[in-house]
Image: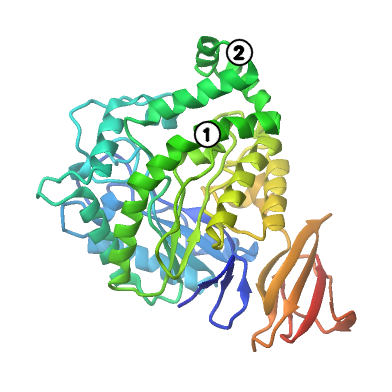
Amino acid sequence: MVLRTDGARLRDHHGRHRVLHGINLVAKGNRRPTGSFVDRGFRGSWTPGDLTDLASRGFTLVRLGVIWAAVEPEPGRYDDAYLGWILEQLDAIHDAGMLALLDSHQDLYSQNYSDGAPTWATLTDHEFADTDLWSDAYLTSPAVHEALDRFWENAPGPDGVGLQDRFAAMWRHVAARFHGHPALAGYDLINEPTPGSQAPQIFGTVLGAFAAVTGQDLEQVFADFDDPEAKFAQLARLEDVAVHRQIGDTVAPLVAAFEADAVAPLMARVSAAIRTVDPGTLILREHDYFANIGIPSGQPPLDDANWAYSPHGYDLTVDTPAIALSSNTRATTIFARHAETAERLGVPVIVGEWGALTLGRGVADHGVALQDLFDSFGWSWTYWVWEDGFADSEAAAALTRPRPVAFAGDGQQWRVVDGTLHATWRGADTGEPSLFFAPDGVAHAHRDGAPVPVTRDGAWISVAAGEGDFELTAR
């Protein structure tokens, strides 16, 4: 077992408190229903050199996309060539000194519309039409709605087997193939589970609450959210944290019902399938799609001994040319709601997606603010997303900063101020040292107020394990 949970902390096999930082790597594919996995766009463009670059930034974790349509192109037939490529990625991630989460990625449910389920598992008679902002199809597309409804109903596929049963069997096959790999840290069961035909109702309730809380005409609010400039003017009202939270509280019962009635049974089915072949590797559970914007998650705990919560969150500037205008206030409200969920569940957090800062300029402040927030919560995370050119981007520079990796004992607090990491921990005799990433070279540590040696190996700093109260400053 690479990682195990201990209350709200993650521990490695030495018993050290681990804090993981990293990035998403995913090849979503194209809409070709047949051909090799390469023809269908499922081979990523990153190289071992890119992985080395990521590790040199202090990243220790990759959230690696695994697409159902690529794994199982026909019911019950698994593509060994694609899984062999996934194995190559795990080997390369391990060689670079990082760990990996396998993420069953989906957007708009199906490879027919974006990425995720195979064509044979997409049950609808409706035609699909792309929307200007891809994610709007969650709200407007009858094809997406019906396909998702059939999935949540566990409707029988073309072979008579329920879609969720096939999905769980796919996960069992993946876990059987990769269980025990030294890079494998966990399974992220499904990306951003989303309701089908209920989605427009939920979003309508969001806008209704928005109009009521801000004292506006509902029809005008609906019209403004269809106009990009007017939409961003409306979003400014969410700079009032009380308004943002009140809207979330109004809509929360709807998403809580979906998570309890539809998502939780799926999570139980899939985790049970995985546990038949892998009894201990960490399982990650996400919240529903609407929680990304600050609607509190109502998910119940997962009945498993080793699982973590993996929230996502974005300001509504995401995937638009206005990404540099992302609001730190609005994003903080979103992740504060996730912190409430994490406290209720009592499990560790690995933020699965955040940022989406792209290769543009003017994004560093938002990236730094969110890293500061996650540090204050004591959370691990994987940034969304690597793309060609990432290494030279402003986002990459903002993500390269000092951070804790492993505390020999219990990490207490850590923060980065003016480029300097300040960290405190309650030490324990774990055998292996506390480990930190600090690229600029200066580090000092104390134990119970007295200086202790610091060992440096390039950008990596270690402090010998032991009991007592420790503190470190490092650049």
**Rendered location of residue 259, percent (x, y):** 40, 45
State whether residue 258 is above or below residue 409.
above
Name the kind of residue labelled 1 in the image: Asp
Residue at left offset 58%, top offset 66%: 60
Residue mark closest to the camera, 2 vs 1? 2
Say which mark, if any, is on residue 216: 2
Give the secondary structure at mark 1: loop
Q: Give the crowd class for mark 2: few <14, some 14-19, many >=20 residues within 10 Å.
A: few
Q: Which residue is mark 1?
A: 319
Q: CA distance from mark 2 to mark 1?
A: 27 Å
Q: Nearer the viewer, residue 341 or 387?
A: 341
Q: Give the crowd class for mark 1: few <14, some 14-19, many >=20 residues within 10 Å.
A: some
**Rendered location of residue 173, percent (x, y):** 25, 65
Left or right: where 112 falls relative to 102: left
- The quarter of the displayed image where residue 289 is located: top left
Q: Nearer the viewer, residue 205 or 417?
A: 205
**Rendered location of residue 283, percent (x, y):** 43, 64
Residue at left offset 29%, top offset 52%: 68
Counting labels gives: 2
Quarter of the image with the N terminus in it = bottom left
Say which mark, if any, is on residue 423: none
Q: How is the image coloured?
A: rainbow
Left or right: where 356 falls relative to 201: right
Return the residue found at the far left.
159
**Rendered location of residue 16, percent (x, y):** 62, 78
Quarter of the image with the C terminus in it = bottom right
Q: Nearer the viewer, residue 152 or 190?
A: 152
Residues at circles 2 and 1 in contact by the CB criterion of under 8 Å: no
State whether residue 290 is above or below residue 140.
below
Sooner in the amino-acid sequence: mark 2 or mark 1: 2
Give the secondary structure at mark 2: loop
